[in-house]
Image (spheres, helix red, strand yellow):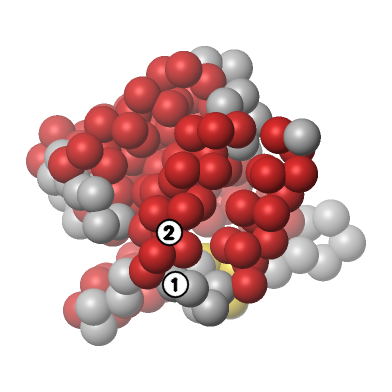
Amino acid sequence: NAVLHRANIDRIGEIIELAGRLGADRLELANTQYYGWALENRKALLSSLTQLGEDVTNDVLVARAVLAQSIGDNDGALALTGRVLTEEPGNYQAVLIEAQVYQNRGETEKSLTRIKAALGAEPGNDRLRLQYARLLARSDLDAAAEQYGVLLKNATDDAELRLSLALVYREKK
C-alpha cells in the first residue's frame, strides 16, 4: 500500500518498480483526499505516469489503466490493458481492469466472457474467480453459487466468502 500525495507523486514509477522487485502480487496506490481533491490528484498521477514515457513495465501500464478507468477514461484503460495483454496474455490484473471497463459500459456478457476465458487458462486464480462470482451474482445465481463454492473449497474459514454464498442462496429463494 503506497499513499500518494503531491510530495511523492513524481516518484510513482519508482514505487511501482520497487513493488515489482519485491514480488508484490498487488500494489494499492492510495490517493490522498483532502476536501475533494482526490479526482485532481488522480488526474495529476495519471499525468505523472504518462510522463514516464512509452518504454515502461507492464506494472506501470496496469497502474495507468487503473487510473484511467477511475477517472472515466474507459477507452484509455482498454488501450493500456490491450498493450499489457499483447505482451503478457496471462496478466490477470489487466484482465480484471478490462472486464471492469466492459461492465462500466454495460457490456456484461463481454465482461463475463473475458473473465471466464482467463479462468480457463488459470483456474487456480482466486482473484479472477471471485470477480467472476461477483459478476455472475447479478445475473445467474446458480453459476455464482458454484463459483463461490469453488472458492470456499480452498478457503473454508473465509467468513466473507461464506457470507457471499449465503446471500446468493438467500436471493435464490
Which residue is rendered at x = 53% and y = 39% of the image? 144
Residue 35 location, quadrant: bottom right
Local SS, label 2: helix
Q: CA distance from mark 1 to mark 2?
A: 6 Å
Alpha-carbon neighbours of circle 1 within 10 Å: few (<14), some, or many (≥20)? few
Which residue is rendered at x = 44% and y = 26% of the image? 111
Q: Position of residue 80 (x, y in %)?
A: 32, 36
Q: Which residue type does callout 1 highlight?
A: Ala
Check disc 1 and report the residue beneath it: 155
Location of the C terminus (image quadrant):
top right
Q: Residue furthest front?
A: 173
Q: Residue furthest right?
A: 35
Q: Position of residue 24 (x, y in %)?
A: 31, 76
Residue 10 appears in view: no
Q: Is residue 62 left or right of residue 69?
A: left
Which residue is rendered at x = 58% and y = 62% of the image? 161
Q: Which residue type does callout 2 highlight?
A: Leu
Q: Position of residue 133 (x, y in %)?
A: 50, 43
Answer yes or no: do the residues labelled 1 and 2 have beta carbons within 8 Å? yes
Check disc 2 and report the residue beneath it: 151
64 in relation to 117, above or below: below
Q: Camera-side residue: 54 or 108? A: 108
